[in-house]
Image (cartoon, grey):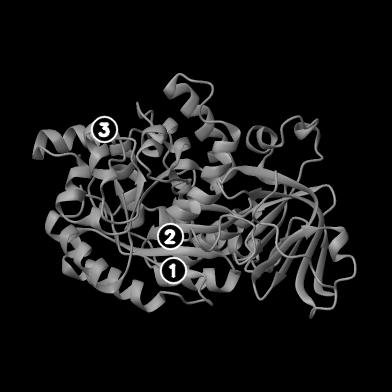
Amino acid sequence: MTPSSRGKPTDVREKPADLVITGCTVLVHDDRERIGFEEDAAVVVRDGVVDSVTTAAAVVGLTAVHRIDARGQLALPGLINCHTHAPMVALRGLAEDLPTDEWFNDVVWPVESNLTERDVELGARLACAEMIRAGVTCFADHYFAMDAVAAVVAECGMRALLGQAYFSSQGSEGRERSLEFALRHRDVADGRVTTALAPHAPYTVTDADLAATAELAHAHGLPVHLHAAENRDQTDTSLARHGVTPIEVLERTGILETDVLIAHGTGIVERDLPLLARAGGRTAVATAPRGYLKFAWPTTTPVRALRDIGVPVGLATDGAASNNSLDVWETMALTSLIQKSSEGDPRWLTSRQALHHATLQSARAVGLGGTVGRIAPGRRADLVLVDLSGPHTQPVHDLAATLVHSARSADVRTTIVDGRVLMRDRELLTLDVPAVVRELTERLPALTDRGHGRRVQEYDT
C-alpha cells in the first residue's frame, strides 16, 4: 500500500533535523485509516513534530542533532492509556481477590483517606516510569492531588490528559477544585498537559453536580472524564432505584452534550446506544479488560456495538490497584481476545482492528485525534521502537498479529515524546526509579493503615 504518511523526499541541504530514526519498519495509516507497514524506512523529526516518513536511503546524507539506527526494529505510534489512576501503583496488590464493593469499602477508599500529596507524587513517578518502559507516551488520569501528577508529567516528558476527581460528598468545593485545576494546568508543559473536569461517577456525584459540571465544561471549553456504567450491577441498581441507566443520567444532566470520556462502560445496555449515537459532544469510551476479569464482571465493554454507532473505544489499564499493571500492550491483546469470546466470532477483533484501537481510536478518545495516534507529517513525534527479534516473536508471518499477540511491552526499546527520547535501549532517561521505590517503601506503613475507620467515600450501588 502507499501510505498517506509519506512526506516529501528529504532534502539533504535542509537544516539539521532534531532527530532521525532510520532503517526501521514503520506502522502507517492510509487515507482510509487502514494499517500498513513501510519497510527500510526513516522518520525525520523537527521541533517535536514528524517532518517526514521516507526511505532510509533518502536520509543517508541528512545531518541531525540525534540519530537512531533502528535496523531490525519497528516504529509505531506511542501507546495511550486512556483511563488510569497513576498514583494507585502504590496500592498494587493491596486489595486482591475481592468483590467490587469490598475492594472499595474495606481497602481502597480507607487507604486513600491517608493519601498525602507526596504519596501521590511518588506513585505518579513510579507509574510514569512503568508506562514509559511499556511504550506508553500519553495517559488520561483521574485522581486526587493532581497538581503533583501534573508536575511529574512536566518533568518526565510524557503527555497526559489530567483531571482532579471529585465526589458530591465534598460539597461544591470539590467541583470548584476540579475546575480550578483544569484551568490552571491546561496546555502547560509545552502543551503536553491537557485537562478535563473529573466528576467521579453518577453513583457518587448528584444529578445537580453533573449538570453544573456540564455547564462549566461548555463555559470553559473543557472535556469531562468520568466513570459510568462501569459494570452491569451499577446499571441494574440505577434502574431499580431511579428508573434510568447511568448513561441516561449522563444524557439528562447534559454530560453527553460535552466532550466526554467514559471509563469502562461494561454496563452499557442496548437502550443506551441511541443516546450515545446522538450525543452532542465528542463521546468516547475507555476499556480496561484485565480488571473486569479480576472482578468477575459478567460483561465487557461492547466495543462492536460502540463501533457501529461511531463511538471510539480507547485502550486503558485503570489503576494498578485493580489491574496490577499499567501495560497497555496487554490491554491490546486482551481486548482482541475477549471481544472474540464475547461476540462468539473469531473474526472480531482482528489484529489490525486492535492496532487501530491502540493508535487512532485511543488518540481520539483523549481528545488528541489530530495531534498523535499516527506517524505522519505534522503529527507530534510520539513514537516507540520495538524489537521483534526475540524467539517469542519469530518467525513473522503477519506483522500485525505478531505485534498484538506475540510481542510484549518488554520488547519496547525506545520511547519518544515530542521528539524527546525518554527511554533509549531500555534505559530510562528522565526518572530515577530506585530513589522513588526507596522513599515510597518507607511511606507504605502510614499509607496503608486502615485502623482509623475513615473512607473517602462509600461504594453503594
The numbered disc on residue 194 is: 1
Task: Using residue 191 as the reference point, say whether residue 384 is left or right of it.
Answer: right
Indicate the position of residue 340 as horizontal and vertical percent values: 49, 24
Indicate the position of residue 225 as horizontal and vertical percent values: 34, 57
Query: Which residue is located at x 28 percent, y 44 percent?
Result: 276
Amino acid of disc 1: Thr
**Relative to residue 433, is residue 147 depicted above or below?**
below
Q: Of tags 1 and 2, which is closer to the observer? A: 2
Query: Which residue is located at x 53 percent, y 59 percent?
Result: 138
Q: Could you tell me which quadrant the N terminus lies in?
A: top right
**What is the crowding at mark 2: few (fewer than 14 residues within 10 Å), some, or many (at least 20)?**
many
The numbered disc on residue 367 is: 2
Residue placed most toward the observer, 342 or 167: 342
Dot placed on the residue nearer the N-terminal end, 1 or 3: 1
Residue placed most toward the observer, 455 or 257: 257
Please, which residue is most extreme toward the bottom here?
Answer: 15
Q: Are marks 1 and 2 in contact (CB under 8 Å)?
A: yes
Q: Secondary structure at mark 1?
A: strand
Q: Are marks 2 and 3 in contact (CB under 8 Å)?
A: no
Task: Using residue 221 as the reference point, say whether residue 214 is left or right of it.
Answer: left
